[in-house]
Image (cartoon, rainbow, N blue to C red):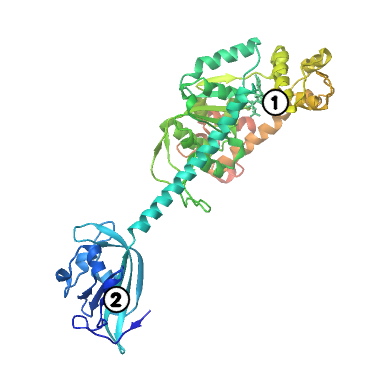
Amino acid sequence: MVQKTNTTTSSAHFLPENTLLLDAVGEGIYGFDLQGNAVFINPAAQRMTGWRNDELLGKNIHNCHHHSHADGSPYPQESCPIYQTLKDGVAREVAQDVFWRKDGSSFPVLYSSTPVYQGSVMVGVIAIFRDISVQKQTELSLRQALNQVQALSEQLAAENHELQQALADKTGNMGIKGSSPVMAHLLQQIHLVANTNSTVLICGESGTGKELVARNLHQLSRRKHKLMVSVNCAAFSPSLLESELFGHEKGAFTGANTQRKGKFEQADKGTLFLDEVAELSLEAQSKLLRVIQEQEFQRLGGSSNIKIDIRLIAASHHNLLERVEQGLFRMDLYYRLNVFPIHVPPLRDRLEDMPELVESMLLNISKKLAKKITCVSQAGMAELKAYHWPGNVRELQNILEREAILSQASELDIHQLPFKELSKIKPSANRQTLAQAQATHIRHTLEQLNWQISGEHGAAKQLGLPASTLRSKMQKLGIVRQDTTSRQPNNDKNP
Ligand SMILES: Nc1ncnc2c1ncn2[C@@H]1O[C@H](COP(=O)(O)OP(=O)(O)OP(=O)(O)O)[C@@H](O)[C@H]1O
C-alpha cells in the first residue's frame, strides 16, 4: 500500500517535523532516502540492533543489519525487500526474516517497507520492524509440546493395551493352562527361550493360544518392563501396513499431516509381535527382512536411518514352509524367523487339559456374568471331550460363556456344540484352491518379470526360492509361457 506525506525535516525531508511520535513507538523505524542511505533511526531500532544513530545515519546500512539470511548465507542487497521498494515503489511485508545486531547475533523480525511520497514524487522508504523472538519461541515450544503430546498419546495407547493385558493376567485369563505332556513340553520351550533375544516363530491353528505364548515369552524376558507391541499383519493393506510398521514423516503421503512413529519404534527395547506374519505381502517381507538383518530402517518419506533394538516374535496359523513352497513366503525370511520354532498343539490333541481349562474359564466367566457356576456336568464334559474343536481354546471359551448365559444352575450342561458339522471337514479339502493360488501367484510374478527365472531380477529371487525349486514347481503346476512358439528359446526364460 502506498503512503503519502508532505512533511520534511532537515535530516529526512519526508519525515514529520515532530519526530517525538516515531521516537516513542515500540517498533523499530528506519527511514531511507532514494539512494538507500539511512536518514532516520528511532530509539527502538537502536535498542534492538545495538547500532547507534551516529554509526548508521547517512550510510547504506544493508550490510549492518541485513547482510545474511538466518542460515548465515549471504543476503545481497538487490534481493532485500526494503531496497526493492526503493526501486519499484511497491510496499512489502515480510514475516520470515532476521536482522543482525552489532554484536553479530540476530533476531527474527516481522517488517514492512513502505514508499513515502511528496506529492506524486517518491522521496524515500520507511521500514518498520518488530522483534518477534518471543512469538517464535512460543510457537516453537507449542510445536514441541504438540509433538510430545502426540508421542505420549501413541505411547499411552500402546501402554493402555499392555495394561489391559496385564489386568487380564491378574484375573487369570492370560495364564497358560494345561498340564498334558504336549503342554508341559510347550512350557519348557517357553522357559528355555524366553530370556534370550532369539527370534521365535509360533505356529499353530487359530485360537490355540499363540498370542498367549508370545505374551508369556515377553513377560519372562528381560524386556518385560518395556512394551510388547502387537501387529496383526492381516489387518492392513500392504501400503498401510508399511506405514504402520515403519511410521511416516509429515507429508510422506496425502493425509500424513504429522510425523508418526511406527510399531518398530514403539517396540524399541521391547518386543515386537508380528501376528499372522504369513499375510505380509512379498514387498513387505523384503522390507522386514532388511530391518531384521540391519536392525535399522527409515520412516516412509524419511531419509535418516533409525536404529532399533527389538526382540521379534512372529506367529502364523499357516504352515509357513508350505507357504514358502507355494511361493507366497520368502524362504530367506522364513529362516530368519524360524530361529526357535514353537508349535502350539490344537485342543483336540490335548483333551486331557479340558477339565483344567474348563475350571479356569468358568471362574472367569462366573465373575464376568456375576453367576456362580462351579463346574460342567459329567455328561457335558464327555460332550466337550468328544468334540473336534476346530476353533480350539477360543471356541471353548465362547461355548462355555454361551452355555453359562443360558444356564440357571451351578453345574453346566453342554446342550449344543456349534460347528459340529464343520469339524468333520477334513483340513485337506482346500488343497486344490491353494495349488491354484500358488500357480496364479507364480504366473503373475513371472509375467511381471518378463518370465525371467534366475538372476538378480528373476522371479526366483523375488519369490525367495532357489531357481531350481521354482522350475520344478512350474513343471508340477503346469505353468508354461503361452507365446513361446514365437520366440527364441532362452536358457534363462521359461524352460
Ligand atoms: N492354554 C491356555 N490356557 C488358557 N487360556 C488359553 C490357552 N490357550 C488359549 N487361551 C485363550 O484362548 C484365547 C485365544 O488365544 P490366542 O488369541 O492366544 O490364540 P491365537 O492362537 O493367537 O489365535 P489366532 O491365531 O486366531 O490369532 C485367548 O483368550 C487365550 O487367553
Query: Which sits in the foreground, 280 or 429?
Result: 280
Which residue, given by chain and number where applicable, does mark 1 sit on?
394
Q: Nearer the viewer, residue 48 or 62?
A: 48
Counting every numbered tag in the picture gives 2
Residue flagged by tag 2: what amino acid is it? Leu
Identify whether 146 is placed above or below 266. below
Instruction: Name above or below for residue 483 compared with residue 430.
Output: below
Q: Is residue 131 left or right of residue 11?
A: right
Q: Give the quadrant of residue 148.
A: top left
* Left or right: where 331 falls relative to 409: left
Q: Point out residue 27 in the picture as x, y percentages from the top left corner.
A: 31, 68
Q: Are marks 1 and 2 in contact (CB under 8 Å)?
A: no
Q: Nearer the viewer, residue 365 or 208?
A: 365
| Residue 23 visible in the shown view | yes
Q: CA distance from mark 1 to mark 2?
A: 82 Å
> Which residue shows up at 41% across the image and 32% down it?
294
Q: Earlier in the sequence, mark 1 or mark 2?
A: 2
> Front-most of 166 and 74?
166
The residue beneath circle 2 is 21
For the N terminus, the image quarter is bottom left
Q: Which residue appears at 44% of the width and 29% of the height?
A: 269
In percent of width and height, residue 167 lies at 60, 27
What amino acid is labelled 1 in the image?
Arg
For the residue with label 1, is its CB less than 8 Å from the closest atom of ligand 1?
Answer: yes
Q: Horizontal and vertical percent for residue 282? A: 54, 37
Of labels 1 and 2, the one closer to you: 2
